[in-house]
């Protein structure tokens, strides 16, 4: 294990005041070696600590520190300098392997890092997790961990993940459950692999780990047009979606009897593909799998309903809006637009579904729509004054689409305002109201 090099240090922090400088090596805290910022975050939280530092000349300092438990050592521990633990798998469904060439380098990075699961909510397969790192999770009580399960069949999991060491998922789930580490799970369902009876067995295998495995989502495999040289996979069709919903419903019934919770949830795509109505709010409980597209439409609709019920339907004038979305959400967003127009008669809303030419037509979700596809497909001759796009169409914290077009350049190309709106119904209602009545 290499010592931790101090690269960023607050000049007013505890360590700096004791003579520690950038370039020094942080060897240990309370006798435990420091691997990364996660160690510093947890080991440095004590009120009395012993820090071992090596200076550039080789001299070893032992520093006894007394501080408040919430007082920082003065090191940068925001996770921004973590060296990403790269994925060692070769998953048959990996979307990064299906990316078109020529996109920004960061989009091709495959991580499988339990630290990012804790810090950012990423899902990890656990295949590159050593016994030492598993023990660290337990010792520090790092949770929740978001785990890509996919299947509990050892042979099938090794095949799907392209890793002969991937077959111990049940042992891993049992280990973390034994040590009371909270988890969430995910299954990317690939027809012909982990669907049907294989899916049913996986769900029944993992339900025994509840409540430590708090929730589980099932999402359909996403297939781009860039699969040359990759294993043959097939999209989820209406029949397969309906079959999958039936399997999940059966397991939910068992979980409701035993634990009073549904536990496993299909993503919204399954209901849309099967032509079935979306469930109500009670179905999703605390909406713990929203980030996986589970219950997102139901939550959006409820937020929009409540927001519209609370407004005074006034307006200073008319306004034409365009809601840009993916093909899959077209009907849903049209219903939302009608609900808004009923409250605000002066609002004229067009829903503009964008076919995904960048990744391929089978990619229908709005989060993968690119600026270039929008420019090509939005009619040039229209009277739309404001276009709304969901914030998950752009890179987090930026105004950049996946193809690096910006909101500004899109606005210029369309000749109108382009506004980014959080993926919440109340946010859309507020954005409309602001342009109709001000505020």
Image (spheres, rainbow, N blue to C red):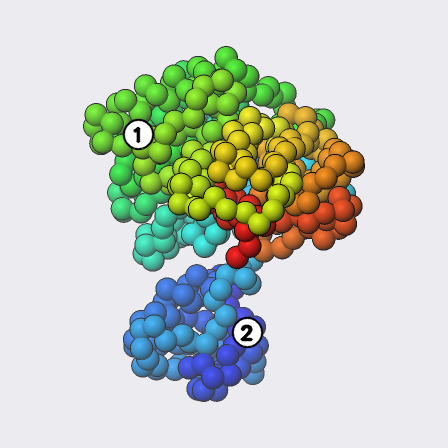
Density class for disc 1 (Cα within 10 Å; few <14, some 14-19, many ≥20) is many
Q: Is residue 274 visible?
A: yes
Compare residues 314 and 311 and report the one nearer the observer: 314
| Res 73 quadrant in image | bottom left
Which quarter of the picture shows residue 385?
Answer: top right
At a point 32% along the width and 36% down the height, the residue shown is 285
Q: Residues within 10 Å of mark 2 (few under 14, many from 20)?
A: some
Q: At 58% across and 28% down in the image, what residue appears?
A: 330
In this view, which residue lies farthest toward the top? 239
Tell me, yes or no, whether the two marked residues, 1 and 2, touch with CB atoms within 8 Å. no
Q: Is residue 90 above or below residue 313?
A: above
> Relative to 7, is 38 on the left or the right?
left
Camera-nearest residue between 85 and 424: 424
Instruction: Say if 135 sits above or below 245 in the image.
Output: below
Q: Is disc 1 placed on a helix, strand or loop? A: loop
Sequence order check, earlier mark of 1 and 2: 2
Q: Which residue is mark 2?
A: 8
Coordinates of residue 93 in the picture (x, y in percent): 58, 30
Q: Could you tell me residue 333's position as x and y percent?
A: 55, 32
Question: What residue does disc 1 label?
Answer: 262
**What x and y, as percent, mark residue 411?**
72, 48
Residue 265 appears at what percent x and percent y?
39, 30
Q: Which of 213/15 is in front?
A: 213
Query: What residue appears at the point 43 percent right and 22 percent down from the top-left corner?
Result: 277
Dot 2 falls on a residue whose secondary structure is: loop
Q: Is residue 126 above or below residue 397?
A: above
């Amino acid at each position: 294990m290499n010592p931790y090099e101090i690269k960023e240090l607050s000049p007013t922090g505890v360590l700096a005041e004791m003579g520690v400088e950038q370039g020094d090596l942080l060897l240990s805290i309370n006798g435990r070696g420091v691997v990364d910022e996660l160690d510093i975050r947890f080991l440095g939280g004590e009120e009395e600590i012993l820090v071992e530092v090596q200076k550039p000349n080789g001299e070893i300092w032992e520093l006894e520190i007394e501080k408040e438990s919430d007082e920082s050592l003065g090191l940068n521990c925001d996770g921004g300098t973590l060296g990403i633990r790269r994925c060692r798998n070769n998953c048959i469904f990996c979307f990064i392997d299906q990316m078109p060439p020529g996109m920004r380098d960061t989009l091709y990075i495959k991580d499988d890092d339990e630290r990012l699961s804790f810090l950012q909510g990423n899902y990890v397969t656990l295949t590159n997790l050593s016994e030492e790192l598993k023990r660290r999770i337990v010792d520090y009580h790092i949770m929740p961990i978001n785990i890509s399960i996919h299947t509990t069949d050892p042979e099938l999991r090794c095949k799907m993940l392209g890793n002969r060491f991937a077959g111990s998922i049940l042992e891993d789930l049992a280990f973390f459950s034994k040590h009371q580490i909270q988890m969430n799970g995910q299954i990317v369902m690939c027809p012909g692999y982990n669907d049907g009876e294989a899916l049913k067995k996986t769900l029944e295998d993992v339900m025994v780990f509840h409540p430590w495995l708090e929730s589980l989502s099932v999402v359909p495999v996403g297939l781009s047009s860039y699969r040359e040289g990759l294993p043959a996979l097939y999209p989820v069709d209406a029949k397969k979606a309906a079959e999958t919903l039936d399997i999940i419903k059966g397991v939910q019934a068992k979980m409701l009897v035993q634990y009073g919770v549904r536990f496993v949830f299909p993503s919204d795509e399954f209901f849309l593909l099967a032509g079935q109505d979306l469930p109500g709010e009670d179905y999703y409980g605390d909406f713990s799998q929203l980030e996986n597209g589970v219950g997102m439409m139901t939550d959006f609709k409820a937020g929009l309903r409540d927001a519209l019920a609370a407004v005074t339907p006034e307006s200073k004038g008319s306004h034409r809006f365009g809601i840009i979305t993916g093909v899959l959400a077209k009907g849903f967003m049209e219903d939302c637009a009608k609900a808004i127009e009923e409250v605000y008669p002066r609002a004229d809303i067009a829903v503009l579904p964008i076919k995904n030419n960048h990744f391929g037509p089978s990619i229908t979700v709005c989060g993968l729509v690119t600026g270039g596809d929008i420019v090509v497909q939005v009619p040039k001759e229209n009277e739309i004054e404001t276009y709304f796009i969901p914030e998950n169409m752009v890179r987090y914290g930026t105004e950049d689409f996946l193809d690096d077009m910006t909101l500004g350049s899109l606005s210029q190309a369309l000749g109108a305002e382009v506004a980014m709106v959080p993926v919440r119904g109340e946010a859309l209602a507020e954005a409309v109201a602001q342009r109709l009545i001000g505020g």
